[in-house]
Amino acid sequence: MDKYYTKPCNFYFGKQSEKKVKNKQSLPIGGNRSISFDTIEIVSRKNKKLINIKKISKLSKNLRKKINSDILNIKKRKNFKNLKLKNLPILMGVINMTPDSFSDGGKFNKTNSAIERAKNLIKKGCKIIDVGGESTRPGSKEVSFKNEWKRMKGFFKKSKSLNCLISLDTRKSKIMEVASKYKVDLVNDVSGLNYDISTINFLKKTKKPFVIHHSKGLPQNMQKKPNYKNVLLDIYDFFENKLKIINKNGINHKNIILDPGIGFGKNLKHNITLLKHVSIFHSLGYPVMLGISRKRFIKDLAGINDSKERIGGTISSTMWLMMQGVQILRVHDFNEVNQAIKVFKSLKFK
């Protein structure tokens, strides 16, 4: 029997959305009435079909049961820790304490500059700050535990005074252990919990919220002819299987975020497919996060070599993802992206 997937589409926004939800003409994304949909795309690996939500009752019993279950996941209110995922999207500010990150390596790799950067982000309204000491850009080399922690130790010693959630960007459970003695509210492991076999035990023991991030291969080889049967559905299945493994390992809390991993073992076609159809991941029932800030796909589409000059591409991608109901976006240029969101929402949502 074919496996079916449910993708919400044909979105409404702002007052129009609220009115349609009230009149039962559309369904909200994540309990947020200001963004809703009235059509789903039923997808399999062989075909796909658009259907209005009013016509779901006419489908076969088994398919109807599957789709209604997915729709409950899409509709249900998603809160994450003490963040209310209603005023979307939430922006995650980036602090790379590395000399070699693709976009801002060396800019914030000292304790004082990183702390000042964090305070500045918080002042501007940032709710989550993602801090890392190892670059995992395509082609980067692995950093030892000693060097990775040396880069971040000073920041974490001062992190308790920061009034925001601190996300730890690391693949190593030992880094998670030592950083947690100070302040870690979220673990962001770009390996999808695959790099270190002890990571799941750490997450079970501490009950820390975490991101399930999809990547294919290691940074050293992830961009060497990445291949998928169907990138969208392969990654959906990856999340579904990983959630089952996590549950079997005794992790039952719902403070989990899903990140399809733009640029991590994907070529341009893969990235564009994921961005265009990202709303399919809502049917897994967890908040969706993407890191699109200054990424290579912007260079490929717009011909901009310098990553620091890709703010325009970052903002346009942000607008698209916001209109697909994506809850969290990881960004370098917090002020510019936040400003664009405020103006766009004033024009589109009010």
Image (cartoon, rainbow, N blue to C red):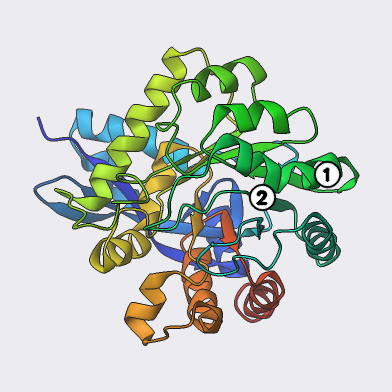
Outermost residue toward the bottom? 303
Q: Earlier in the sequence, mark 2 or mark 1?
A: 2
Please tell me which residue lies in front, 130 or 285: 130
Q: Does 92 appear above or below 103?
A: above
Direction from residue 350 to residue 41 in the image, left or right: left
Number of numbered discs present? Answer: 2
Direction from residue 338 to residue 54 in the image, left or right: left
Q: CA distance from mark 2 to mark 1?
A: 11 Å
Q: Taking the image as drawn, is residue 262 in sight? A: yes
Residue found 87% across the figure and 40% down from its top: 160
Going by the numbered disc 1, the residue's amino acid type is: Ser
In which quadrant will I find the C terminus? bottom right
Please tell me which residue lies in front, 68 or 96: 96
In which quadrant will I find the N terminus? top left
Residue 54 rendering spot, x and y as whole percentages: 34, 50
Q: Does 166 appear above or below 311?
A: above
Direction from residue 191 to residue 161 in the image, left or right: right
Going by the numbered disc 2, the residue's amino acid type is: Val
Q: Tags 2 and 1 in contact by the CB under 8 Å rule?
A: yes
Q: Which mark is residue 131?
A: 2
Residue 13 rendering spot, x and y as whole percentages: 55, 67
Residue 280 rendering spot, x and y as whole percentages: 35, 50
Residue 122 falls in image quadrant = bottom right
Please tell me which residue lies in front, 328 or 189: 189
Q: Which mark is residue 159?
A: 1
Residue 286 rendering spot, x and y as whole percentages: 50, 39
Residue found 50% across the figure and 72% down from its top: 294
